[in-house]
Amino acid sequence: FTFDLNRKDLKEAAINLGLFSLVAFPVGLITGFIKPSTALPSLVEIAGRGVAIFLFIAIPEEVLFRGTIHRYLERVLKWTPRLTLIVSSIIFGAAHLDNPPNVGYYFILASMAGFFYGRTYLRTGKIVPAALVHLAVDWIWSVLFAG
């Protein structure tokens, strides 16, 4: 794993965040899974959430799901990149089934998110760009939406 990022990595992260947003925000709003927040946290809390999400959620989950599970499916079981991406995304979604309320919607949206995190990983070959997309999704959700 490397923390060495280049413009291509950042561009890929931005593209996948945008693609996920185009799909997930409408689904989340239509289903009522997310609702716009009525108040924003303080700037200190907003920044703190970003650091905490990156260090304690995005990096560890991406190391587990992309760096371990995804790589295992692809390299050890010799699955195709497409099948690996789909299955690892579903596993990622299933790992979030214990997050109430609305676990069904959470599973669907987490699986969709896992797809775009995995897509970022496949296109860059790096964990950190996927973790940056993960950070952005979780941070936007925690700051701008009530879940």
Image (cartoon, rainbow, N blue to C red):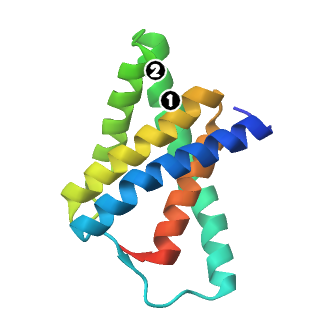
Q: Position of residue 30 (x, y in %)?
A: 25, 66
Residue visible at 39% across and 13% down? Answer: 79
Tag 1: residue type? Thr
Q: Is residue 81 left or right of residue 92?
A: right
Q: Residues within 10 Å of mark 2 (few under 14, many from 20)?
A: some
Residue visible at 34% across and 44% down? Answer: 111
Residue visible at 59% across and 44% down? Answer: 15
Asked if 98 appears above or below 126 in the picture, the reply is below
Asked if 114 appears above or below 54 in the picture, the reply is above
Q: Which quadrant holds the C terminus? A: bottom left
Tag 2: residue type? Tyr
Q: Secondary structure at mark 1?
A: helix
Which is more toward the observer, 144 or 97?
Answer: 144
Q: Which residue is mark 2?
A: 72
Asked if 25 appears above or below 2 in the picture, the reply is below
User: Visible in this render: residue 101?
Assistant: no
Q: Is residue 5 left or right of residue 127?
A: right
Q: Position of residue 40 (x, y in %)?
A: 54, 87
Q: Which mark is residue 68?
A: 1
